[in-house]
Image: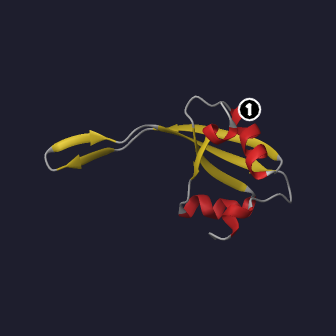
Amino acid sequence: MNARQVILRPVITELSMAATANGKYTFAVDPRANKTQIKQAVQEIFNVKVRSVHTMNVPGKERRVGVHLGRKPDWKKAIVTLEEGQRIEFFEGLR
């Protein structure tokens, strides 16, 4: 898997944007990716040093359309902590 296949998209929420002040960035990642692959992908794409990676599997929510019930897909989230003094420019304009 190459780096662009591991990191799917950034997670832009109020809570994740507040965490960027502490050097923590949140990404939706491929469910098959492990912590080492996520760390290498972030370092390659954004040219930063990663201190740690925390991952979690997020269950999809149930959705209703009229009388029909459905489910959104499950996904994997990674919270990446950068070394002191490092930052990702992409997130800076969003705060």
Who's the residue at 55% across and 32% down the image?
31
Point out residue 11 in the picture as x, y percentages from the top left corner: 56, 54
How many marks the image carries: the answer is 1
Q: Which of these two is toward me, 4 or 68?
A: 4
Q: Classify the position of the N terminus by image quarter.
A: top right
Query: Quadrant location of the C terminus?
Result: bottom right
| Quarter-of-image position of residue 87 | bottom right
Query: Dot 1: few (<14), some (14–19), or many (≥20) neighbours within 10 Å?
Result: few
The image position of residue 47, as x and y in percent, is: 81, 51
The correct choice, above or below, for 40 with respect to 14 in the image is above
Taking 54 as reference, is 83 left or right? Answer: right
> Which amino acid type corresponds to the residue marked 1 in the rendered image?
Thr
Quarter residue 56 falls in: top right
Which residue occupies the foreground of this view, 66 or 24? 66
Percent x, y for residue 63?
28, 47
Task: Name the residue at the left extreme.
Answer: 67
Q: Residue at x 68, y 34 (%)?
A: 2
- Return the residue nearer the eye: 13 or 93: 93
* The residue positioned farthest toward the right in the image shown: 85
Name the residue carrying label 1.
Answer: 36
* Colour scheme employed for the rendering of this structure: secondary structure
Closer-to-camera residue (22/69): 69
Residue ID at (40%, 38%)? 73
Query: Is 12 drawn above or below residue 4 in the view shown?
Result: below
Q: Describe the element under mark 1 as helix, strand or loop.
A: helix
Left or right of 54, for residue 62: left
Where residue 65 sits: x, y (%)? Answer: 20, 49
Q: Determine which quarter of the picture holds residue 62.
A: top left
